[in-house]
Image (cartoon, rainbow, N blue to C red):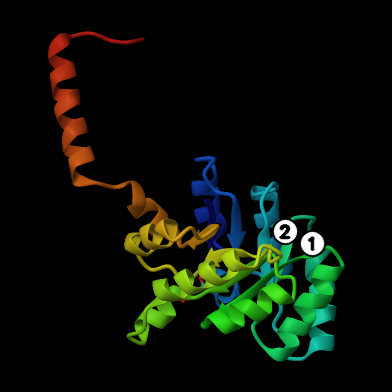
Amino acid sequence: MKIFLDSADIKEIEELVITGLIDGVTTNPSLIAKSGRDIKEVTKEICNLVPHGPVSAEVTAMDYETMMKEADVLRKISDNIAIKVPLTFDGLRACKALSGEDTLVNVTLCFTANQALLAAKAGATFISPFLGRLDDLGMDGTELISEIADIYMSYPEFETEILAASIRSVKHVKDVALLGADVVTLPGKVLKAMYKHPLTDAGLEAFNADWATTGQSIL
Ligand code: G3P
C-alpha cells in the first residue's frame, strides 16, 4: 500500500519524508490556500522533496478548455505531477484527454461507486473517494471503498488505483488497508498517530530502566 501525504506544508513534508515511507503527496486548493504560498512555487518544492512519487496538483477551472490550459501549466512544473480534476462532466472529459497524453490524472471529490466507474473508464490513474466527508454526513465512507474495490476487481481492464482520501483517523487507515485500497493520503497528524501506542512507550521506558542497571553500552 502506498502512503501519500495530504499536505502543502513544506515543513511537514520535509519532516516526514525522511522516514522513507512517503510515496507521494496530494494537494488541493484548500491546502494551497492554507500554505499561503504561490501554487507553482510550493508545488515545485514539493516535487523536489518527493522526486520519485506523484504529486497531485489540482486544476481550479470548471470548464474543460480552461482545465486543459491549467493542466498544461501544472504538468510543466515537474515530471512527477499528477493532475487532479474534479468528478464533473468537464473533469471526466479532461481526465480522458490528459490520460491519453500520458499525464497522470487523479480524479477527486468522488462520493459514489458510479462516479468511480466513470473515472476508471476515463483512464484515471487514481480515483479519490473522500471517506471523512461522507462520514461527516452520517454515511459510510469505508463502504464506498469496498464497493469501488469490488467493481474494479470485476473489470481487469480498469487500471485506476483507489486512493483513499479525506482520512481523519487511524481507524480509517486500517479500514481502507483491510479493503485493499492501493493508496492512502494522510494528513501528517494521522501518520504520526499510526505509530503511537502507550504500551510501546511503557515497554520502552521499562527496557531503558533495566538497561541502565547493567551499566553497559553498545557503542
Ligand atoms: O486531498 C483531498 C482530501 O484528502 C480532503 O480531505 O479532510 O478536507 O475532507 P478533507
Please determine whether, in this image, residue 37 is positioned above or below residue 113.
above
Q: How crowded is the residue under tag 1: few (<14 C-alpha within 10 Å), some, or many (20+)?
A: some
Residue 200 in the image: x percent, y percent?
Answer: 23, 39
Observer-nearest of 94 and 57 = 94
Q: Position of residue 108 (x, y in %)?
A: 61, 76
Locate the C terminus by quadrant. top left
Residue 42 visible (yes or no):
no
Q: Is 74 placed left or right of 202 in the picture? A: right
Q: Number of callouts in the render? A: 2
Name the residue type under label 2: Lys
Secondary element at tag 1: loop
Check if mark 2's residue and mark 1's residue have beta carbons within 8 Å: yes
2 or 1: tag closer to the N-terminus? 2
Q: Is residue 66 shown left or right of residue 13?
A: right
Residue at point 67%, 81% (across, down): 118
Q: Which residue is mark 1?
A: 77
Secondary structure beneath dot 2 equals: helix
Closer to us: 181 or 39: 181
Q: Position of residue 43 (x, y in %)?
A: 69, 62
Q: Between marks 2 and 1, how big is the CA–CA gap? A: 6 Å
Circle 2 residues within 10 Å: few <14, some 14–19, many ≥20: some
Task: Indicate the amino acid at tag 1.
Answer: Ile
Q: Which residue is mark 2?
A: 44
